[in-house]
Amino acid sequence: GQQLNQSPQSMFIQEGEDVSMNCTSSSIFNTWLWYKQDPGEGPVLLIALYKAGELTSNGRLTAQFGITRKDSFLNISASIPSDVGIYFCAGQRYSGAGSYQLTFGKGTKLSVIP
Amino acid sequence: KAGVTQTPRYLIKTRGQQVTLSCSPISGHRSVSWYQQTPGQGLQFLFEYFSETQRNKGNFPGRFSGRQFSNSRSEMNVSTLELGDSALYLCASSIDRARVLSSYNEQFFGPGTRLTVL
């Protein structure tokens, strides 16, 4: 099935550094989402973006919905050890019959060196 | 409020067997979606159930099936297991879209069932 192109695949950063990751798609999505998955857990929603060009913050996280509706980025400022995990982007579009389907990127594995 | 629960958490099967996984959604949630997560393919949508009916389906073979009960609990079944079916199977629940004012109907994920096929 279709997937989003998410980069980078993995990152090793020093505690306190800023992090940036992005997602691109060949097709348009109505909503962009960013999730974080910790080991042994399911993904947890971090930020949802609803409009092209929208810039949204959630604490140290900032995400933007691209103008073309085909891309999004996530920034994490001043990283801390608990930021470790896998970050996924996801695009959502209406599939009909009241159903909204998510398409996921392959994830960015973040490691933070204390 | 309790989160999405999935049972069992871990399962080991052999090729050719079949398996049934269970998902209990958050109380009041009527939609349940299933995803397969593998290192190579990432998170792939399997299907979604709402009010005991499948209303969306991903690109998986017919060996993968599911159902939803009147209490919104859902099960998925995989028949004639193959080695490539080894994966983390995630269930996500969401509230009825028509009752949500925001433009996104958030899906809450369970911890998953880790299936290993030998």
Image (tube, helix red, strand yellow):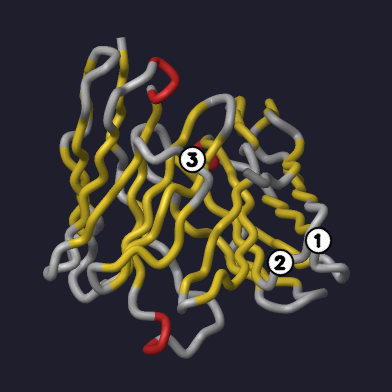
Q: Which residue is mark 1?
A: A70
A45 with respect to A90 (left or right):
left
Comparing B77 with A35, the one in front is B77
Q: Image point 46% across, 35% down: which residue?
A: B37
Q: Residue A2: horizontal and vertical position, in percent? A: 67, 46
How many residues crowd mark 1 within 10 Å: few (<14), some (14–19), many (20+)?
some
Q: CA distance from mark 2 to mark 1?
A: 7 Å
Q: Quadrant of residue B50?
A: bottom left
**Residue located beneath label 3 in the image:** A82
Q: Is residue B108 visible?
A: yes
Dot placed on the residue nearer the N-terminal end, 3 or 1:
1
Dot 2: chain letter: A
Q: Determine whether the residue tagged by mark 1 lies in a helix, strand or loop.
A: loop
> Comparing marks 2 and 3, which lies closer to the viewer?
2
Mark 2 on the same chain as mark 3: yes
Considering only vertical position in the picture, is B7 above or below A97? above
Q: Provide residue B43's location: percent of width, then percent of height.
A: 52, 41
The quadrant in which residue B84 appears is top left
- The quarter of the picture where the C terminus of chain A appears is top right
Tell which residue pokes out farthest to the front in this image.
B62
Residue contact at pointers 2 and 1, CB within 8 angstroms: yes
Residue A18 can be seen in this image: no
